Amino acid sequence: MARADFDRRHRFLLLGRVSPGKLLDLGVGITLNSGSPYTETLGQDIYNNGRGRARPESVNRNTLEGDGYATLDLRASRDVKIGAGKEARAVTLGLDAFNLLNRVNYGTYVGTFGSPLFGVPVSARPPRQLQISARLKF
């Protein structure tokens, strides 16, 4: 029985938030996945169906596995009150850092047997990103 394209053997997700004082809130997100499967192919259209995804004889679908995925995301935010009494509003100022360790998380791999790129990743997921945001609370 073959694995599905989205099948990951291991998956871990940790989300947390702490408010160490009245100064700001700190949030953390850690995501870890084992590698996703991909299929070894011949790179030829031996069945004349126009797809060119034929597998070598005795090779099952999704028998190869790519690298895993790991990311660390951090958020620092603070609510700033505007006004007083029942008319008071709050603005949340936030600073987000995604994939803080800037780890390369590969996406697609070459599964064509005989290719010089066989088993080599040819795409990567988004790199480190910094985002500043503000949100008005009613």
Image (cartoon, rainbow, N blue to C red):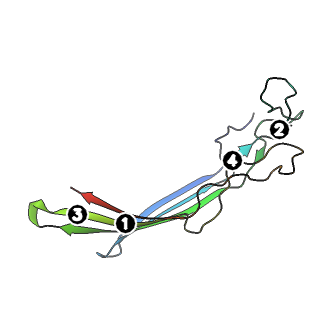
Q: Nearer the viewer, mark 4 or mark 1?
A: 1
Instruction: Say if 28 sits above or below 118 in the image.
Output: below
Q: Residues within 10 Å of mark 3 (few under 14, many from 20)?
A: some
Secondary structure category for the residue under label 3? strand
Q: Quadrant of the C terminus?
A: bottom left
Q: Amino acid at mark 4?
A: Ser
Percent coordinates x, y for residue 41 in the rendering: 83, 38
Identify the residue at horizontal 58%, vertical 57% (top origin): 126
Percent coordinates x, y for residue 64 in the rendering: 78, 46
Q: CA distance from mark 1 to mark 2?
A: 47 Å
Asked whether the residues under the numbered discs 1 and 2 touch, taking CB atoms below 8 Å apart as contact, a structural biologist would say: no
* Residue furthest left as drawn: 85
Q: CA distance from mark 4 to mark 1?
A: 33 Å
Asked whether the residues under the numbered discs 4 and 1 touch, taking CB atoms below 8 Å apart as contact, a structural biologist would say: no
Q: Which residue is mark 4?
A: 36
User: Along the horizontal axis of the image, is 115 left or right of 36?
Assistant: right
Q: Which mark is residue 90?
A: 3
Secondary structure category for the residue under label 1? strand
Q: Which mark is residue 94?
A: 1
Q: Which mark is residue 41?
A: 2
Q: Earlier in the sequence, mark 4 or mark 1?
A: 4
Work out whether residue 67 or residue 126 is closer to the camera in this orientation and state it. Answer: 126
Q: Earlier in the sequence, mark 1 or mark 2?
A: 2
Work out whether residue 77 or residue 118 is closer to the camera in this orientation and state it. Answer: 118
Identify the residue at horizontal 71%, vertical 38% (top origin): 3
Q: Amino acid at mark 1?
A: Gly
Percent coordinates x, y for residue 70 in the rendering: 61, 60
